[in-house]
Amino acid sequence: MTKNSSNIMALAPNTSNKRETVCIFGTGDFGRALGHKMIQAGYPVVFGSRSTQISSLIPKDAEVLSHAEAAQKAAIIIIAIQREHYNFLTPLAEILQGKVLVDVSNNLKINQYPESNAEYLAQLVPGAKVVKAFNTVSAWALQSGTLDASRQVFVCGDDMKAKQMVMDIVRALGLTPLDQGSLLAAQEIENYPLQLFPMWKFPVLLSLGLVAFFFFYCLIRDVIYPYVYENKDFSFFIAISIPNRICPILALTLLALVYLPGVLAAIIQLYRGTKYRRFPDWLDKWMLCRKQLGLVALAFASLHVLYTLVIPIRSFVRWRISSHIVSQALNNKTEPLDNTNAWLSDSYLALGILGFFLFVLLGITSLPSVSNNVNWREFRFVQSKLGYLTLILCTAHTLVYGGKWFLSPSAYRWCLPSAYMLSLIVPCIVLVVKFVLVFPCLDKPLTRIRQGWERKPQYSK
Amino acid sequence: MTKNSSNIMALAPNTSNKRETVCIFGTGDFGRALGHKMIQAGYPVVFGSRSTQISSLIPKDAEVLSHAEAAQKAAIIIIAIQREHYNFLTPLAEILQGKVLVDVSNNLKINQYPESNAEYLAQLVPGAKVVKAFNTVSAWALQSGTLDASRQVFVCGDDMKAKQMVMDIVRALGLTPLDQGSLLAAQEIENYPLQLFPMWKFPVLLSLGLVAFFFFYCLIRDVIYPYVYENKDFSFFIAISIPNRICPILALTLLALVYLPGVLAAIIQLYRGTKYRRFPDWLDKWMLCRKQLGLVALAFASLHVLYTLVIPIRSFVRWRISSHIVSQALNNKTEPLDNTNAWLSDSYLALGILGFFLFVLLGITSLPSVSNNVNWREFRFVQSKLGYLTLILCTAHTLVYGGKWFLSPSAYRWCLPSAYMLSLIVPCIVLVVKFVLVFPCLDKPLTRIRQGWERKPQYSK
Amino acid sequence: MTKNSSNIMALAPNTSNKRETVCIFGTGDFGRALGHKMIQAGYPVVFGSRSTQISSLIPKDAEVLSHAEAAQKAAIIIIAIQREHYNFLTPLAEILQGKVLVDVSNNLKINQYPESNAEYLAQLVPGAKVVKAFNTVSAWALQSGTLDASRQVFVCGDDMKAKQMVMDIVRALGLTPLDQGSLLAAQEIENYPLQLFPMWKFPVLLSLGLVAFFFFYCLIRDVIYPYVYENKDFSFFIAISIPNRICPILALTLLALVYLPGVLAAIIQLYRGTKYRRFPDWLDKWMLCRKQLGLVALAFASLHVLYTLVIPIRSFVRWRISSHIVSQALNNKTEPLDNTNAWLSDSYLALGILGFFLFVLLGITSLPSVSNNVNWREFRFVQSKLGYLTLILCTAHTLVYGGKWFLSPSAYRWCLPSAYMLSLIVPCIVLVVKFVLVFPCLDKPLTRIRQGWERKPQYSK
């Protein structure tokens, strides 16, 4: 029942080495899109369907047969139907014997079923070789060719040869197969497209919590306190002044939290005298989301920069400056240049600029395409040496910002210190401990431990 | 005639499994560069040339023979000569029988010939298996090793095995082969290196047109009008003030144009009651260049940010502020703080900062290496949810900017409203329609349509 | 001695087509990490060790045998031990006959030994097929799965088939193999992980030297001179004012140095009348680090932008402006708007903004993932056309900045011209020479030379 309009003949490559026929069960969106793409790549495609009536939506070069007939024509059968309808395959078990079944299904919820769809399929048709693949690719992206989101196709399966066949098809379609191992990985692969930035969850929740805390802290100190004591309405501080206090605090704290786990790990290793024991679970998880923590910190730092740079445009600031100048002029006095002030103001700005600049550099090197082009030594140089330099510069920026008023009692309102002072706690702890760890009496044993030496050799031979 | 200086022997790998000999017809720049690279990768290379006199430019390890002799030594022959000279191959047809001919040629103009060079080659030597490859790689990049521009090599051909052989060579040279299907794709592959940002053409032309329109609009309102009525020379507004009006208008309008086609598509699907009919052609094209539209919008937004941040450094602004303060001092009056103004100014700046921040986030996630690392759900979350939030923030930024003078008649000059008001038209339409589409009475049928349901089932079975 | 807890059986894929066994010599960190990863990918792994006592650190699914026993079980043996201990392999020579030995070792210093470790191994066991691989991957990255730094595995070896087998394993582990040719490349591959940004060395050293020079230059002109002649203490200029002079100077000079070698190359080609002679070595090296020069220039330009934008927030600037306004008010005079000043100030800012914007565009297109997605013509358009436009805009920005005082004698202090004037030397030379080269009388022969034409044909046939 092959169509043979001249137009279609032109499209079919007159190959001497034809690709092997692929069978697709199911004529839904995804099955059709995949079939269309495969025909483009030179595969003869045959659809298996309940009704063999030809719909105008099915790619023109494809055959449509009954499930049993279609299955007999190909070694690879793509099961593009919902898991709920898998049991229609049971009567076909004999025909499917030895065939490669590709499970492309997705669920609606994470861990919706006790076993993955692919494993369920393998149980239903024990004689077939089940391979999980293509579930991360969207039908729309296949059709439109705009594979902006992932070109990666995760593949898993127990049969090496079957997996290889599927991976060859994936490559032929211009996608990148990633072998994830045996069919046990199917659960994870099926959960993957349902995930929404799992690595970002902790950093984002943590920073939301901190934002809420510091917002109310600043609201009390900067809006409610002057309203109560001086009856001034500074409610408009909510728009820029308070965010511009919260952002640098979060940037500095989160940046310090990137380096804290490394310092803790060093202390644990020194205390235990070995590196051959797993870190506590929370430390492991913390270490794995350091990149995300750092990028959230960078986001807050960028916002801080923007909020700071618009200061001179703010109507309130312009009013404050002009009223100050007018009062000077009316009082007939000119202020001399305060050299200490000029030094403090300039050096705190300079430290902030350099810190932010290095921070952005760190962010750029964490882009996947950049970090793929550096070797391990370079990556560690940037992320560790430059990272600590950034932390030092940003901490110094905050310390100099405090300037003369730092720790002075007049800065307290209702016993609450300025918010920026709270932001210094974690970075100062990290820097002090790191400084202590650099001393030879601690650095030497730590280096030896990391090279495999043990104080009480019990784990390694 | 193999050279055998000791130095060269050291370079030749003493392999037990040698790679297969490759023949190159033509000793021009590209042929030599490719030959050099192949020798490095361990391929024995033999050049076919009119004169077998050895030039000092040909890689030292290569043999140079007559065309006929060279062709007999290899299964793969790379035709590194101009299309105009292809007819010299006709007498060699017998020797080329069954060989793999690799067409690496490019043209000077898009669609220069009725058929692609590779298809022309296939017609000339019907017994050979023609594969198109390497035309996107530059000789200079091959030689210098700086393959900054594309490492991708598009490959097409009718014979699967021949194509596979060529793709293996491509991989051995450290390049990435991309199978584009049958030889019919050769035309497109030959046009590819001649293209100059084809997807960017429409967004760039559109924005150039809008820039021209708004430039004259602002010129009339802000320079000519005050010159005519107040005899003031504000011609220097052309440098910063007018660009800083045009940039935000274009950024907002283009951002709205990114989301307009999605809204139109939803209306069309609701009206038709099915998703199984193609959208009009202009809508399809529009949807495919949304990413480019968005990035052009981001460029204008970034320029707007820079233009805005330099405002306090401008000599004109400093003069205006200082003369305002001086006149206050001379008139012996101090203005009180206008709380409403402070609120308006701060909140419009804050909305702009947040909008721009999200906009940059959108831009970063559209980097190929970032979007390759997110799954489809995450990509859609960022591009759709965050995208609409950006549009809302930027529209609110513009609305608050208008502030008290919004729609007031004094803002009209020669019946022309302020330019920023024109920029609100498209975003407001998009947001209103999107808001309406979110209502359950419309959202429910739309979701069902997108899942495949049809009001009048006529297309699917 | 296979472990058979039920838990482990579940993890072992019940494959019909098992992968081939891999043997690993050495149970250190790297050997264990690699073994663990291979078991995950479905390879049966057997460790060869001096003591076959099972350590709790060795992956549970792996066997541990003596070296001789382990070697007999596999065709591929990974040598995960230090080079110093390689001689223990000599007695095993007979068993290792025909096996594939994978050298994964690294050295502590660049070119530590006269021959590479892999070549040394090949000499020790002449009957084996030695392949170099995996040395760029870190044990920690393998274990934690965070392969942020390079996924690339450089592979080299004299035996094609052995290399292919190793590259298949690399791919199965989810890494990207890159074939580097014969075993002679091993030296370079072993040096690779010890390199620290080799391409960046020259640009960074050059800019550090220039920074030091211009720092003292500005220190003398802007701090010491006023201190000596006017007894004013401007030492705080060190924090912001002087860096903000150095950064634009370096940005402009380095940007011009990106385009200078291209201009020199054109002159050399015109003079020689041929392109078939190698450029002098320094020019070749210079051309290869143009990208890095450009990115360093972009870094300085970004710092210049940040330093400039904080100007209105600086305490010194606020004091200067307010004291100027107060003195105006006290003297009862108002300055009229100086239209020329307004034009100069606005246009120099506008030129700087546009120049910086294009500069950032250039930087973005040099990101590996972006430049991989453009064709050669597009890449050259961006890097050459847009690059020169950037250089022109930035040079014009500096020229207009000088404005009325440009070349006026009052700008000299101790015979030293303003620092920005020095920064104009290189860009002006580049632009003038480039302008001359665009004339048809020079452009035509140059184009012909680049297409292969020679004035005195002596090199090509």
Image (cartoon, coloured by chain):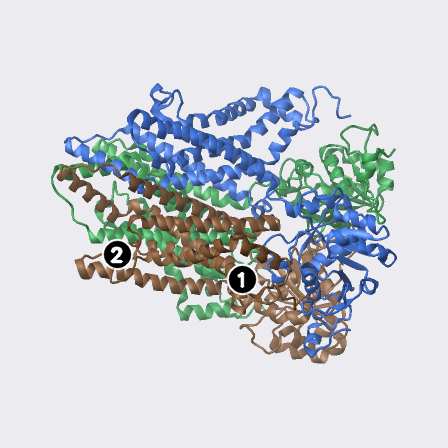
Chain colours: A brown, B green, C blue
Q: Residue at x 34, y 43 (%)?
A: B308
- Secondary structure of the residue carrying numbered label 1: helix
Chain bearing tag 2 is A
Q: Amino acid under label 1?
A: Ala
The front one of A383 and B301 is: A383
Residue on which disc 2 sits: A409
Chain bearing tag 1 is A
Query: Where in the figure is residue C11, as x and y percent of width and height?
Result: 68, 73
Quadrant of the frame with the N terminus of chain C: bottom right
The front one of B12 and B376 is: B12
Q: Does the image show residue C175?
A: yes
- Secondary structure of the residue carrying numbered label 2: helix
Q: Left or right: A254 with respect to A63?
A: left
Mark 1 vs 2, N-terminal side? 1
Query: Where in the figure is residue C406, as x and y percent of width and height?
Result: 37, 23
Q: How many marks?
A: 2
Q: Residue furthest left?
A: B332
Query: Where in the figure is residue A231, as x and y percent of width and height?
Result: 17, 59
- Residues marked 1 and 2, same chain: yes
> Which label sits on residue B446?
none
Q: Amino acid under label 2?
A: Pro
Judge the density around disc 2: few (<14), some (14-19), many (≥20) Cα neighbours within 10 Å: few
Q: Compared with residue C412, is residue B75 higher up or lower down, i.e. above or below?
A: below
Q: Quadrant of residue C320?
A: top left
Quadrant of the frame with the C terminus of chain C: top right
Residue on which disc 1 sits: A265
Q: Quadrant of residue A322?
A: top left
Q: Left or right: A140 with respect to A327?
A: right
Judge the density around disc 1: few (<14), some (14-19), many (≥20) Cα neighbours within 10 Å: some
Q: Residue at x 50, y 26 (%)?
A: C426
Circles 1 and 2: CB atoms closer than 8 Å: no
Q: Residue at x 73, y 58 (%)?
A: C169
